[in-house]
Amino acid sequence: MPISHAAVLTVPVSDQDRALAFYRDVLGFTLYGDTQVSPEMRWVHLRAPDGGLDLALADWLDVPAGSIRGLYLAVDDLEAVSAELTARGLVLTGEHDDTPFGKFHPFLDPDGNELVLYEAAPGLME
């Protein structure tokens, strides 16, 4: 049987409550589950508004908080989404990049994980 799709990416964070507020209130992810699995492990599970890859915010990994690089978040209109998210408190970093593959603008979460807003070039993701 082939793999059907990637389901969950675990994002290393130092403070799950702070990260939850950022991903939910600034980026617009929906809280899908928040379960204390054990005294050492709380599973905070988020889902993007239109589905796709879910995120788990973890402070219990053997990976340093802020070590994710290049998590691309697809948007239909980079300029409009950038304006909306900066109004909610997002600070874009780096430069807006317009390429034959699409438009990109990076930003950091509160722990320094690098994410990228990405608008695919017309016809690229069809």
Image (tube, rainbow, N blue to C red):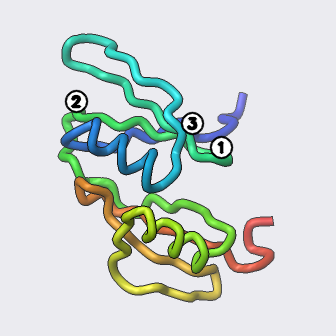
Secondary structure state at the residue bearing disc 3: loop
Report which quarter residue 56 is drawn in.
top left
Which residue is identified by label 3? 7
Instruction: Name the quadrant of the C terminus.
Output: bottom right
Nearest to N terminus: mark 1 or mark 2: 1
Secondary structure state at the residue bearing disc 1: loop
Of the pair 124 and 65, the residue shown nearer to us: 65
Relative side of 49 to 96, left or right: right
Which residue is identified by label 2? 60
Relative side of 46 to 94, left or right: right
Give the residue type that dot 1 points to. Answer: Gly
Which residue is identified by label 1? 51
Relative side of 2 to 57, left or right: right
Q: Residues within 10 Å of mark 3 (few under 14, many from 20)?
A: few
Residue 103 image offset from top left, x and y in percent: 58, 80
Q: CA distance from mark 1 to mark 2?
A: 25 Å
Nearest to N terminus: mark 2 or mark 3: 3
Give the residue type that dot 2 points to. Answer: Trp
